[in-house]
Amino acid sequence: MSSTFQAKRVLITGGAGFIGSHLAEYLLARGAMVTLVDDLSTGSMDNISGLISNPKVRWVPGTVSDRRLVAELVSQTDVVFHLAAAVGVALIAKQPIQTIERNVEPTQFLLAELSRHHELGRSIPVFIASTSEVYGKNPKPFWCEEDDLVYGSTAKARWSYGVSKAIDEFLALGHYRASRLPAVVGRFFNVVGPRQTGAYGMVLPRFVHAGLTGKPLLVHDDGQQIRCFSHVLDVVEAICQLMVTESAAGRVFNIGADRPVSILELAQMVIGRTGNKSAVEFQSYRAAYDDDFEDIRRRVPDLSRLKSTINYAPKFDLEDIIDDVVRWARPVSI
């Protein structure tokens, strides 16, 4: 892996985001030349402040909805990681139209341009970031990649995110079927770590900030929702391995951890590991989001496909993850 990206020109859309900035660091350490494009709608220059002076980094403020910009960037690229998307439950619940537009249109433009180059004989591998939200409210205890997608009513705005990311997947897999464009789709399950903001509803940074400042940890509903949390560095390594694994092309992968934990248990772990005596307070979904918000009670991935394809073995357990987020957040919060 250390020499696989050596001197490769890599394009990261959403490059100033939480995952994008960690991916850029990973690739630079392996000799890649990295172009970061981001419209800073949810990304932050703070995430890449230590990178943009690097001569192997090109920073491009802009949007992947700009067709001319996409054409220019793709023409100068050997590998693409498409991470740009709407993020966060809070943002999605309030802005369903923008969610759909920001998820689907840029992916459509990018894949069309990559396919044009592919048909001309220059094949550029692409990773398409998707989400566990595509499963909707499938009732199975563990979700595998071939499971049915089960959505709620179109009157409930939260499903706009999962549906729009499912369209991204259909587009990527459609291009693979039509021309064998080397596209890999990864469904992220609660990726967390340093630099993640709680501004858009992400639960762990919210909890850590509250724990460090002695404020109550707000737990939505009854706190019995089940989630699995994975460290961003484990996720970054996994997607890079997938991109250099020939058998991964044209397939969908769950990416994350498979240790279930309730949100209430997570809150209690954060309180214990921050060392403060914060209280837990419960908040209804109506107060947190809106009247028609509908949640997913259990979200646990089956990682069999990922493990058999790249021998995936996360280095961080949940306690490590919380400690890493606490170390990063402590100087900011205090």
Image (cartoon, grey):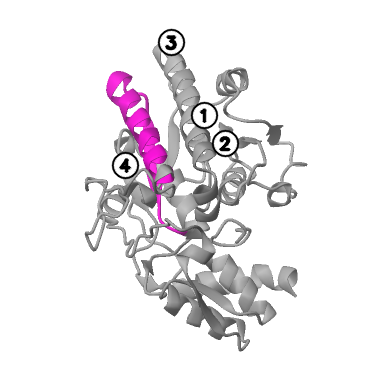
Disc 3 secondary structure class: loop
Disc 3 marks which residue? 120
Mark 1 nearby-residue class (10 Å; few <14, some 14–19, many ≥20): many
Disc 2 secondary structure class: strand
Residue 130's spot in the image, x, y percent? Answer: 41, 43
Question: Looking at the image, which residue is at 33% across and 32% down?
Answer: 170
Which is more N-terminal, label 3 or label 1? Answer: 1
Which is more N-terminal, label 4 or label 3? Answer: 3
Mark in the foreground, 1 or 3: 1
Q: In screen coordinates, is 298 left or right of 319?
A: left
Mark in the foreground, 3 or 4: 4
Estimate the spatial distance between the alpha carbons at disc 2 and disc 3, rounded to whole Å. Answer: 23 Å
Disc 2 marks which residue? 13
**Residue 252 numbered tag:** 4
Which is more N-terminal, label 2 or label 1? Answer: 2
Residue 334: quadrant of the picture: bottom right
Indicate whether 95 appears above or below 196.
above
Disc 1 marks which residue? 106
